[in-house]
Image (spheres, rainbow, N blue to C red):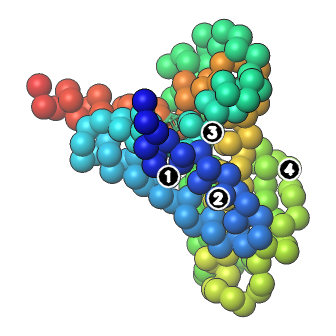
């Protein structure tokens, strides 16, 4: 079957991280991946984004299937269990809330800009070369560092479980996937 432009969105995922390496402000572009799936779910009641436009899901498939980086072992059942998926979603949203709170503190002058990433929510990685102080208000940069950390951490987790289990194991507990699935279910229940 002839490939369409959206079959190459996995390249965009790579470009996103490369851009953020050189200039952290590009991290804001990740909000597209955050908002578009929600719009599809709320307006259309479907998971069209996951099935067609998700660059991360595609990247995991390309790495795992075409590049043979996955052991292709059965994904443990607990990773796709309800309690784990919803627990991870709550944790993920709490971490996002913390990013917003840190951004607020910087905007309010109660905190200073931290030019570093937090990988896996714990490991501090200096990233100061990716931002020139004063270019934009500090809170904009603070959100960038926080959001890029979140995007990179979740992609790394996706790559780890891709290597250990099936290529798209991440999708079984991806917070965006859980969120859009829940919205679609609620929407369809309402329409009945
Ligand atoms: S579940 Fe997450 S990573 Fe997988 S396709 Fe959907 S949004 Fe992308």
The answer to which image quadrant residue 76 occupies is top right
* Mark earlier in primary sequence (3, 2): 2
* Mark earlier in primary sequence (2, 4): 2
Nearest to viewer (mark 2 / mark 1): 2
Considering depth in this image, is 4 or 88 the residue closer to the camera?
Answer: 4
The circle on residue 16 is 2
Visible in this render: residue 170? no
At 43% from the left and 43% from the top, the residue drawn is 4
The residue wearing badge 4 is: 123
Label 3, label 2: how far apart the Cα atoms are: 12 Å
Seen as rendered, the residue at the extreme bottom is 134
Q: Is residue 24 left or right of residue 87?
A: right
Nearest to viewer (mark 1 / mark 4): 1
Label 2, label 1: how far apart the Cα atoms are: 11 Å
Label 1, label 4: how far apart the Cα atoms are: 24 Å
Q: 10 Å neighbourhood of mark 1: few (<14), some, or many (≥20)? A: some
Q: Is residue 48 above or below residue 66?
A: below
The circle on residue 59 is 3
Label 3: which secondary element = helix
At 63% from the left and 77% from the top, the residue drawn is 139
């Amino acid at each position: 079957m002839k490939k369409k432009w959206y079959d190459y969105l996995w390249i965009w995922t790579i470009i996103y991280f490369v851009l953020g390496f050189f200039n952290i402000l590009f991290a804001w572009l990740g909000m597209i991946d955050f908002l578009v799936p929600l719009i599809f779910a709320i307006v259309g009641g479907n998971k069209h984004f996951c099935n067609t436009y998700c660059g991360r899901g595609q990247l995991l498939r390309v790495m795992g299937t075409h590049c043979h980086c996955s052991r292709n072992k059965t994904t443990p059942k607990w990773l796709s269990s309800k309690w784990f998926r919803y627990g991870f979603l709550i944790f993920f949203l709490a971490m996002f809330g913390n990013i917003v709170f840190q951004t607020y503190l910087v905007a309010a002058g109660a905190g200073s800009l931290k030019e570093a990433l937090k990988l896996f929510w714990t490991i501090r990685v200096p990233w100061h070369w990716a931002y020139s102080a004063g270019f934009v208000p500090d809170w904009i940069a603070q959100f960038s560092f926080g959001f890029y950390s979140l995007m990179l951490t979740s992609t790394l987790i996706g790559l780890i479980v891709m290597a250990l289990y099936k290529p798209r194991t991440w999708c079984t507990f991806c917070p965006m996937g859980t969120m859009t699935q829940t919205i679609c279910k609620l929407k369809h229940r309402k329409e009945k």
